[in-house]
Image (spheres, rainbow, N blue to C red):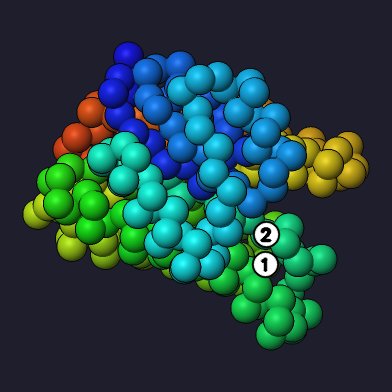
Amino acid sequence: MRFENKIALITAAASGIGRATAEIMVREGATVICIDNHPQRLDAAIAALGDRAHPRLCDALDQTQVDAFVADTVKHFSRIDILVNAVGGSTIIAKPSANVEEHSLDDWQLVIKFNLDGTFLFTHAVVPVMKQQRSGKIVNLASIAGRGVSVASGSAYAAAKGGIIAFTRKLSFELGPHSININAIAPSLTLTERIRPHWNQRSPQAQTAQLEATPLRRVAEASDQAKVICFLASSDADFVTGLTIDVTGGQSG
């Protein structure tokens, strides 16, 4: 029971990697505050997760909502042990893999905001709590695109996820003296509810090429990413900080 008596906040917890992470943490004893802005998906997730999961509707890109939510959480639970920043993605725009000249400024700003702002705002709000209690684990979601080697990702998404990697590394120096660990994972293509339809629309040849580029010869599931997040959020990673782990099945691009 790695997370017994721990209070964990997970954003985008109603689906995908966030929900898969919540499933593991609940199973291993955590009280999980599941944050999402989609009420129907959130209700369905909570029904499946059970009594240790608590739903909270919150727009992760709205500072007023985030600050109020974190203050309310501390009021009710007295502490915050874990923060998983899972908000992000590329399919928020119509053509996420567009070349740079095809991106509009609006597309660029939307992808940057969606991937960076929520991570900043929740970290900004939670860090003072963790500093006061002199403990805490933060795990961010980057992407292999943030390494600059993914041919399938657009430049806006690459820039945003590269920002997550740099943000994570920089904050490790700020937060380490306060006994706060901050790390990230960099997933490859992962078959979440949002991504699976795009995968299914690929030609058999394109799917085969993806699999042949992956040494483990399969595409990741949300649970593959969640297991590594939970390692980083647990005491098993007490001496790990500032690191971004590529969870790609060996794929390098």
Which residue: 71% across, 81% down? 106
151 vs 196, nearest the viewer? 196
* Residue contact between numbered discs 1 and 2, judged by CB atoms under 8 Å: yes
Element marked by disc 2: loop
Mark 2 surroundings within 10 Å by alpha-carbon count, few (fewer than 14), some (14 through 19), many (20 or more): many
Element marked by disc 1: loop
- Label 1 and label 2: CA atoms lie apart by 8 Å
For residue 90, which numbered disc appears in the image? Answer: 2
For residue 154, which numbered disc appears in the image? Answer: 1
In-image side of 235 versus 125 (left or right): left
Spot occupied by residue 83 in the image (x, y as percentages of width and height) = 37, 45
For residue 32, which numbered disc appears in the image? Answer: none
In-image side of 162 versus 242 (left or right): right
Quadrant in the picture for residue 103: bottom right
Residue 76 position (above or below residue 157) = above
Would you say residue 183 is visible in this rendering?
no
Spot occupied by residue 81 in the image (x, y as percentages of width and height) = 28, 38
Residue 158 position (above or below residue 220) = below
Query: Which of the marked residues, 1 or 2, is nearer the chain's N terminus?
Result: 2
